[in-house]
Amino acid sequence: MSQTPDAPPHLDAGRVSTAPGLFVCFEGGDGAGKSTQVRLLAEFLDRDGRDVLVTRQPGGTTLGAQIRELVLHGDHVSPRAEALLFAADKAHHVDELIRPALSAGRVVITDRYTDSSIAYQGAGRELGGEEIRQLQHWAVGGLLPDLTVVLDVSPEVGRARRGDVQDRLESETDDFHHAVRRGFLDLAARDPDRYVVVDASLPPEEIRARVLARLEEVLEERR
């Protein structure tokens, strides 16, 4: 007698609360315009009287900056070592910066978080999305964003936007970046309540408006 396979675990299994703070993450392929949208959202929330912390990963701490230099600008790093270095950055970043800010009631906006590793190392490096998801979520102790904005961009457009100066991951082939893009879209499709996907080719102000509309829905649900 055949058995029905177990359903895959929900992406938010073991998730911990961000209250009293608010946690927003921007994800997407290289050249998607994340830095611009992080800045626009931070400026809006600051004008609205919110206490905002802007950070990025890898980076955001002294250790994170050193890891960033290793994985993005150093010599060759094996795929599994790369995944572990990104996980170490997340673990330290959450303990030292993100969790204390949320506990103080601040809004944390990050340029990349766990989903980047799931997409880049899990899908792009073919290490397995579920394996990397478990590693990353263990590293951050179940602390996931209230809203993750995926800025969707094709590898070809992303490469044109980046120009000639590219880091180790940016310089990978278009096949790699297509796999990364599919990784992000798959994550968003599996958990639509926590994600919003926005076409990164839209004008920045229109992207900002869509992000704010979705954020307002998240805030209303929390109320």
Image (cartoon, rainbow, N blue to C red):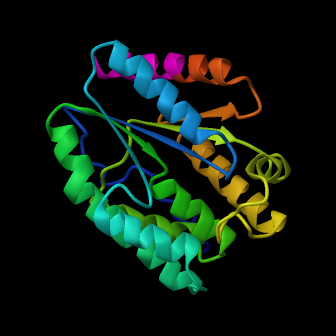
- Who is closer to the viewer here, 24 or 156? 156
The answer to whether 87 appears left or right of 211 in the picture is left
* Residue 186 image offset from top left, x and y in percent: 65, 51
The answer to whether 91 appears left or right of 101 in the picture is right
Look at 68% across and 43% down and name the residue there: 32
* Residue 177 image offset from top left, x and y in percent: 75, 61
Q: Quadrant of the C terminus?
A: top left
Q: Residue 120: tell me if it is visible.
A: yes
* Residue 189 image offset from top left, x and y in percent: 62, 43
What segment carries the magenta color? 212-223
Residue 213 included in the magenta stretch of the image: yes
* 50 to 120, vertically: above or below: above
Residue 191 included in the magenta stretch of the image: no
Magenta span dominant secondary structure? helix
Q: Quadrant of residue 204?
A: top right
The answer to whether 83 appears left or right of 96 in the picture is right
Q: Residue 139: tell me if it is visible.
A: no
Q: Quadrant of residue 118?
A: bottom right
Look at 48% across and 71% down and name the residue there: 69
